[in-house]
Image (cartoon, rainbow, N blue to C red):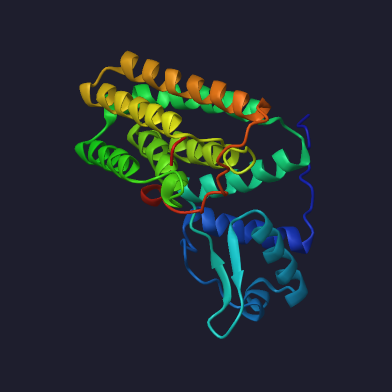
């Protein structure tokens, strides 16, 4: 006797959501494209407009669709790539961190777990363009003072370029998100000495990546992150005044980073 395996009957809203989701996955609706108007979707799917509106609201919450207002507004398919993944990760981790569901030290540990292998991979897969961008970042870092608003952006750029140079797009999404999350919630106490040491460590990482030595690159990144961890912990526990940096601006890899 054959076993009957019934499938749950979806509600109209769930059916609409499922069909639009599958159309996005299949490329019927491409990234950045405006979806048909609610009335048109309701006609096409033989459902009410409130049902379509409810389905679209779920797709917006899932990050597949974005809604805009105005004459040129509507529902648009979100651009889905490793950069949008990084933004979503940052937003989620920032909320979880502020709610106290995870500890900052846990995020810092994961950052080390990812950035050391990323440096190793970068030594193997980097291009001349990646190397030039890293050298350019450090060159800018040497020319600015601690009061310069680009300090934070330059540092994030340094670590983001290394993640990109690893050739792994998941690393390229996770590392900037982790880096960005650990910056705004920690009072970072900088001094000229720490700034100079950080630049020196950055240069050592670049040299290891330039030479194509994964072991050297991984060790240089580990020493850099351990130095920052010790410094941050001592800075947090110290009662002496220090330089407190503002939260970083949310920008692309070529404009993000500082002394970190």
Q: Quadrant of residue 100?
A: top right
Q: How many marks?
A: 0
The single residue placed furthest to the bottom in the displayed view is: 71
* Vertical order, 231 against 161 (above or below): above
* Vertical order, 146 against 80 (above or below): above
* Residue 48 appears anywhere in the view: no
Pick the quarter of the image with the N terminus: top right
* Vertical order, 63 against 46 (above or below): above
Q: Position of residue 44 (x, y in %)?
A: 62, 74
The single residue placed furthest to the front in the displayed view is: 240
Q: Position of residue 123 (x, y in %)?
A: 29, 24
* Residue positioned 77% across, 74% down in the render: 50
Left or right: where 211 falls relative to 110? left
* Residue 117 appears anywhere in the view: yes
Q: Nearer the viewer, residue 186 or 36?
A: 186
* Residue positioned 46% across, 52% down in the render: 149
Q: Position of residue 74 (x, y in %)?
A: 58, 76
Q: Position of residue 185 (x, y in %)?
A: 64, 41
Q: Quadrant of residue 139?
A: top left
Q: Nearer the viewer, residue 13 or 79?
A: 79
Q: Nearer the viewer, residue 204 or 64?
A: 204
């Amino acid at each position: 006797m054959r076993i009957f395996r019934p499938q749950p009957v979806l509600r109209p809203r769930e059916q609409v959501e499922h069909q639009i989701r599958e159309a996005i996955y299949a490329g019927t609706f491409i990234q950045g494209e405006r979806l048909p108007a609610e009335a048109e979707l309701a006609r096409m799917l033989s459902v009410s407009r409130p049902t379509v509106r409810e389905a679209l609201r779920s797709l917006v919450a899932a990050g597949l669709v974005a809604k805009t207002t105005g004459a040129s507004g509507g529902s648009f398919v979100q651009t889905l790539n490793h950069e949008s993944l990084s933004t979503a990760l940052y937003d989620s981790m920032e909320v979880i961190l502020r709610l106290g569901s995870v500890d900052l030290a846990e995020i810092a540990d994961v950052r080390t777990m990812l950035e050391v292998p990323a440096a190793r991979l970068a030594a193997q897969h980097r291009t001349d363009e990646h190397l030039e961008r890293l050298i350019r970042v450090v060159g800018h870092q040497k020319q600015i003072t601690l009061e310069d608003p680009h300090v934070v952006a330059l540092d994030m750029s340094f670590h983001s370029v290394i993640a990109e140079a690893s050739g792994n797009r998941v690393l390229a999404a996770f590392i900037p998100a982790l880096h960005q999350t650990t910056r705004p919630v920690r009072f970072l106490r900088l001094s000229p000495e720490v700034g100079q040491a950080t630049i020196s460590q950055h240069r050592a990482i670049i040299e290891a990546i330039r030479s194509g030595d994964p072991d050297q690159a991984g060790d240089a990144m580990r020493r850099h992150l351990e130095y920052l961890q010790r410094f941050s912990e001592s800075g947090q526990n110290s009662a002496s005044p220090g330089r407190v940096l503002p939260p970083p601006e949310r920008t692309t890899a070529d404009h993000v980073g500082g002394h970190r």
